[in-house]
Image: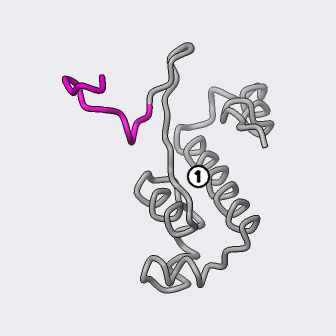
Amino acid sequence: MATKNYYELPVVLELYASPKYEEYSAESSEEMFQEIVAYYVNLNRRRRKITQKQIAEALHISQPGVCQMLKRPATISKLWRLSVAMGGKLEVNIRFGDKVYSLLNEPLPGSEEE
């Protein structure tokens, strides 16, 4: 499955095409981002046939707690915890032209790996 850029998603393109684009607040944009992330986290959970109960057991929290996490998971901490609980690894990258930098695994400035 090809990775899509957030800004290439149909719902985001529709937002930009709207004549009222400038009226949309940062809050509604954040809500939309949260919904998109929650959708893809849940989609991948279902594809891997992982239940909320299994995640709850891995995280040592209640199943309703997992349900709440899955509704609004878009913090790095929550995404990392959910990824690990589902047997995955969270990668967060930033791209500048053709260079990609990992935000979670980048060596510190001045280290030998730089």
The scheme the figure's colours follow is one colour
Residue at the far left in the pictured view: 110
Residue at the far top in the pictured view: 97
Q: Is mark 1 on a helix, strand or loop?
A: helix
Amino acid type at mark 1: Gln
Instruction: Identify the image quadrant of the C terminus.
Output: top left
Which is nearer the eye, 23 or 82?
A: 82
103 in magenta:
yes
- Vertical side of 90 occupied by 94: above or below: above
Residue 73: where, in percent of width, then height? Answer: 53, 60
- Vertical side of 45 occupied by 30: above or below: above
| Magenta stretch in the rendered image | 102-114
Left or right: where 4 falls relative to 71: right
Residue 85: where, in percent of width, then height? Answer: 51, 69
Q: Name the residue under label 1.
A: 34
Which is nearer the eye, 97 or 23?
A: 97
- Vertical side of 110 occupied by 15: above or below: below
